[in-house]
Amino acid sequence: MHIHPILAALRKHRLATLLIALEVALACAVLCNACLLIANRIAAMQVVSGVDEHALGLVVLTGFAPEQAVDLNARALSGLREIPGVQSVSVVNSAPFGPRAGAAGVTTDAEGKHFGGVIDFYVGGPGAIDALGLHVVSGRVPTADEYAAVAQYVPKGAPILITRVLAEHLWPGVDPLGKSLWGFDSQFRVIGVLDHFAIPAPGAGEEKDPDWSIFVPALPGPNFAGTYLVRANPADLDRVMRDAAPTIAKIAPDVVFDTEQSRTLGDLRERFFRNDRAMAGLMIGVIAALLGVTALGITGLASFWVQQRTRTIGIRRALGATRRDILGYFQTENLLIVTFGVLPGIAMALGINLVLMTFYELPRLPLLYLPIGAVALWVLGQLAVLAPALRAASVPPVVATRSA
Amino acid sequence: MFTYYCDLALRSLKRNRVLTALMVLAIAVGIGASMTTLTVMHLLSGDPLPGRSAHIFYPQVDPSPASFAKHPLDMMDYRSALDLWSAHRADRQALIADSPVKLRAPEANVPPLMRTMLATTSDFFAMFDVPFAYGNAWTAQDDADRARVAVISSELNNRLFGGKDSIGKILRIRDSDVRIVGVLAPWRPSPQFYTVVAGNYANGQTADFYAKTEDVFAPFSSALEINDGNFQQFTCWGMPARAGHLTDSPCVWVSLWVQLDGAAKVAEYRGFLAHYAQQQKTLGRFAKDDTRMLDLMGWLDYNHVVPSDVKLQMWLAFAFLAICLCNTVGLLLAKFLRRSGEIGVRRAMGASRRAIFGQCLIEAGMIGFLGGVGGWLLTLFGLWLIRNQPVAYADLAHLDAGMFALTFAVSVAVSLLAGVVPAARASRIAPGLQLKTL
């Protein structure tokens, strides 16, 4: 196949060629970056919470005074435990994908010189660790006498469990057991390491990693009440959560049952990522529309050219060109046009990525995306041109003898 | 001639219906996507107080220790805010702090509700042009007297009192009875500008700035007493002695808005603010004398109020429109040039280039017009989709008159843009060459 005559013919249709190439370039640039955005959102949605989401639900009560808290804890714990199917109920301040509670900056020294970042403090009462299903990889869980009363937000000087990621961030390469961190005007000593425990709002705040959290054991009391972690058999969980509101209305008619936050952890997770899912869906829709429009443009233009060149094709056929030659001509032509588009398209993709990196804190475009994008457009071009090219190949040689 | 060209264009378009439909669809989808996102962008980036925003300012001072923050914090501590407010150096001034409250209405048979209460001062309503359905704002005297009064939102009034005039009725906020003195008409500022803070820490996820307004407004001094223990700090550099009780805490949690009519007053207030900060530094209460005072729109820009997803969607839609445009131009070009013979004959028989150009442009314009109508319908559909999204600004997504006109302007511009190049190219066809090949 000689490329020279194809290039000569394209030179005659410079403007149309340029337009299709430009379309392909734009499509390539948008395709690569949209795929990156989708991958990014999907990766964010895969966050490992480190807890048994399918078996857990939150019950959040508000509108009570600290003086009523002890009484409320007692009523809620016993009332919720009586719902058939409930395995355990414990007092917590929040759970992954639940309401935000207790984020604070911490330091790794008492003087407050070495800032470690803003982390989330999970506070849990007795039984919370088992109920959550947290996985301790080293060290130990707190003993019963290490659960102390909450001073304001957390108990003073409590032993804590820390996630592996946060420990590695605070003390790189060192065994975190026995280390201390300071926050909320208090010292916290690490007694155990968790493999994962996602913060309530992963990816939404200042925290750099979803696992930047610690677990602080505490006794329910005046300053630690109102949020309850319910564990049930996954099959019973939905019914248990439905029963929770009327149960609370019966045992504590004066408090407000927070219907927004009192959900299963699965529901909370679904809601937390709803926006990301919608955005990823939108991107997929745009990519599909984009590729469809591009294919349409290629098919349309190729069809016109085939019609325009019917007589020329007939002459070529009469002079001995096979159907294969004609098919190959249009396919090669398409390959060239798409290539003209893909090359600037790759440069544009990188340019757009640089802009997105500055304004949207997106990661750098992995170079692998570029050849994949290019191949996708080549394949799209070949598929789009196939029908007109086959029509061209079926032009009989006798056309050459007819006048246009 | 125009009607004849329209007739010719219709015939030409009918010759290949599928292709015509696809060209129209491509333009319609491109315009629909762009106009939907542009409308949302327009709604979210607009001025919440048109005509007044240039006179509204957000003063900031920095009460935090030297090592704590590089810039003045987004909110103020109680003492600084109260000092600046009670100096009454601006034309109007309002303190602001949000807190969750438990509400009951002894007269209404509704279970207790948790709602947000805005603690503010009497100037708030006049300064921000808040519309009233019944009654009025409380007075400055009520602020001073810690009067047990409140203004409620139209939504809460519907919920508790069926939308009737509820002036004088009693609302129980936590454990205190307050008298309702005003009911707002529906009020939906976009964004809820007066509570915008911390946009720089939101990672672009700022959709909640567009949430609905608070349901209860109460005098600042009264609200501090009624809801003591339930106030939330913005940030602290030490532990508050008692959680939720912040008036003497090392925390920032209060905002101050001021109205300053005229450049001279603005300059004077800046001077006053700087003087206050220096004075506090001399007294040893402040470690830094940094101050800042942005106007309303400046403050919204500083907080990057438009969610980054919305901006991203807009750029994506415009890239898509560009692709659709390239596509249409290419197809029209091929379509016109295929009729080179026909055009050659017309030219040889005396038609001017201008006439050929006009004929082609009418055909392109027709595709553009159809695409524009389709685009407008798709914009309405797109906005309907956004209204069904789980975002705080969903209920705002409507096409206003300006955006409606802009949609048609964009459609016409896009269609002409798509038609100009192919029409110009077609009008330059040399008649002689075409006649020879016939």
Image (cartoon, grey):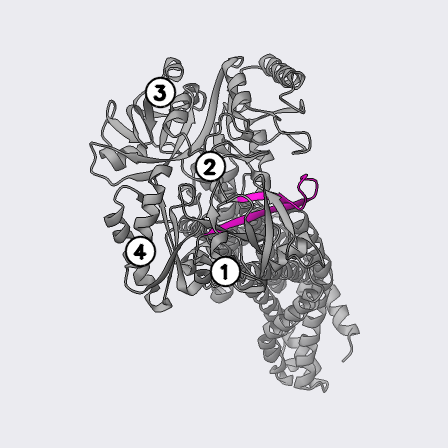
Chain of the residue under label 4: A
Q: Nearer the viewer, mark 3 or mark 1?
A: 3
Residue B7 place in picture, x, y as percent: 47, 55
Residue B141 place in picture, x, y as percent: 38, 13
As shown in the figure, which amino acid type bears the numbered disc 4? Answer: Leu
As shown in the figure, which amino acid type bears the numbered disc 1? Answer: Gly
Q: Nearer the viewer, mark 2 or mark 1?
A: 1
As shown in the figure, which amino acid type bears the numbered disc 3? Answer: Ala
Q: Mark 2 or mark 3, which has the lower sequence index?
A: 3
Marks 4 and 2, how far apart in space?
55 Å
Marks 3 and 4, how far apart in space?
44 Å
> Do the dots labelled 2 and 1 sit on one chain?
no
As shown in the figure, which amino acid type bears the numbered disc 2? Answer: Gly
Q: Nearer the viewer, mark 2 or mark 3?
A: 3
Identify the residue shown where x is 64% and y is 53%: A362
State which region is magenta.
Answer: A103-124
Specify whether residue B269 is painted magenta: no
Marks 2 and 3, how far apart in space?
33 Å
Position of A6 compared to A86: left or right?
Answer: right
Q: Is residue A203 visible?
A: no
Mark 3 is surrounded, within 10 Å at the Cα level, by few (under 14), some (14 to 19) or many (20 or more) other residues, namely many
User: According to the image, label 3 marks what residue?
Assistant: B137
User: According to the image, label 2 marks what residue?
Assistant: B402
> Do the dots labelled 3 and 1 sit on one chain?
no
- Give the dominant element type of the magenta stretch: helix, strand or loop: strand
